[in-house]
Image (spheres, coloured by chain):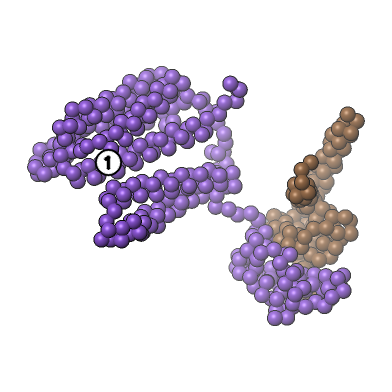
Chain colours: A brown, B purple
Amino acid sequence: MGTDDTLGKLELELRRGVLVLATLSQLRQPRYGYALRQALGEHGLPIEEGTLYPLLRRLEAQGVLQSEWRTEDGPPRRYYVLNSAGRALLKQLAATWQGMNLAMDRLLEDEDTK
Amino acid sequence: MNANEVIEAYIRDVAVHLPLAQRDDVARELRALLAEELQARAESEGVAADADLAVALARGFGRPAEVAARYHGPSHLIDPADTPLFLQSTCIGLAVIWVAGLLGHLSDGVDEAHGGWLGLAGQWWTHTAIPSLWWPGALLACFALAAWIRRRWPARAEWTPRAPDHIPGGRGLLALGLAGVLLGLFVLAEPTRLLDMMLGGGAAPEAYRALTYAPEFRRFLGPLVWLLVALNVPLILAAIVTGRWSARLRGANVVLSLVFCAAAAWVVLDGPVFLAAQSDQLLKPLLVLIVAVTLLGLAVKWYRRVQPVPR
């Protein structure tokens, strides 16, 4: 492996790859941006705010999330939740991820046993 | 500025880059999110939620234009894959234009009455360097159009196999090139024929003089240049007949191009070509440009060569 800088960049690439799936997984129930970031962080996947908040809008524009402003729990907040297309997408992406995960486990095990 | 004003300033700078339809809504959401982030960070660090912390938060969020770009996904004029080619084309094209312009100004001589070398540099800057910016502009338009076409009709951008000896543009284009070479040979043999063709022999005597070869040129260099141009005819004919640029034909073409460049350089450095000096002042810079473009073309081909099999 090269320098720490290279490792950092490669790790960032890996995290980018799972960003959408991680976000969708936490939006089976309505959440607003900051709470979602907290939830992801608590699960060991901290995501920069400058990346996460625009992503929510893009996913909504792609038709997999729906959102609404709510004011009953404090200051006005925009809540996001999966719609039916989002739920279907999450199911498909989760299956793909699990398949990749198994494949990677096998690949890394092969490497370890050599 | 207090923390609130810092956040408001940041939101304004982000929102101004967003499409009008989503500007206010995103700004409203950002305001709520940044306020919450600021408060949480102040609590976790045990400091006051002041302007300094707000600036640090905003900077961590990203440059406003970049943040706005993240809201509507990636957008670019030139495909990232085309960027190296765009940069190469821009640099090479500008270098050719600048060098050709410099040679053109040098051929006019350094006039001490107009500032000497400094005046010449000024002339080059205003008449060559600044106007040369059309080149990157034109390239940008072409690359952007190509990228748009690829996105609009992806099937057209699919890779298709192409033999290394294929004829770019096909036989039709090559036949057109052959016709051009033959016409060029006809005119090169006696340039005054051009006047006869265009004006039916009614041109002024000065015009005939302007296109009449100097005796020294007619003796040796003229026939040599004509012969070198004429040697293109069998090469092109062979490519048309066989339907491909074979390795042998390509090699012969490279040798012929290099010899032609040498002969053209000789013409530029040698004595007069035409009886009228003004004609030479037009022709010689043109020859320099032709040599530069030819050598550049050969250099690009050499640079782009690929040999998957080790020698």
In the figure, B38 relative to B282: above or below? below
Q: Residues within 10 Å of mark 1 (few under 14, many from 20)?
A: many
**Relative to B212, B179 lies left or right:** right
**Relative to B243, A34 lies left or right:** right
SS assignment at label 1 = helix
Please identify the quadrant where the N terminus of chain B is shown: bottom right
Instruction: Locate residue B21, reporting x and y percent.
Output: 62, 67
- Residue located 42% across and 50% down the image: B135
Q: Residue furthest bottom?
A: B1
Can you see residue B68? no
Please identify the quadrant where the C terminus of chain B is shown: top right
Which one is nearer the viewer's eye here, A14 or B257?
B257
Which one is nearer the viewer's eye here, B260 or A105?
B260
Q: Residue furthest right?
A: A113
- Residue located 28% across and 61% down the image: B114
In the figure, A92 relative to A30: above or below? above
Instruction: Locate residue A101, reporting x and y percent.
Output: 85, 41
Which chain letter goes with mark 1? B
- Residue located 40% across and 55% down the image: B129
Number of callouts: 1
**Relative to B236, B284 lies left or right:** left
Q: Residue A60's quadrant in the figure?
A: bottom right
In the figure, A46 relative to B34: above or below? above
**Relative to B140, B292 lies left or right:** left
Can you see residue B248? yes
- Residue located 72% across and 69% down the image: B58
Instruction: Locate residue B199, reporting x and y percent.
Output: 13, 41
Label 1 amino acid? Lys
In the figure, B195 relative to B115: above or below? above
Q: Residue B245's quadrant in the figure?
A: top left
What residue did someone put label 1 on?
B284
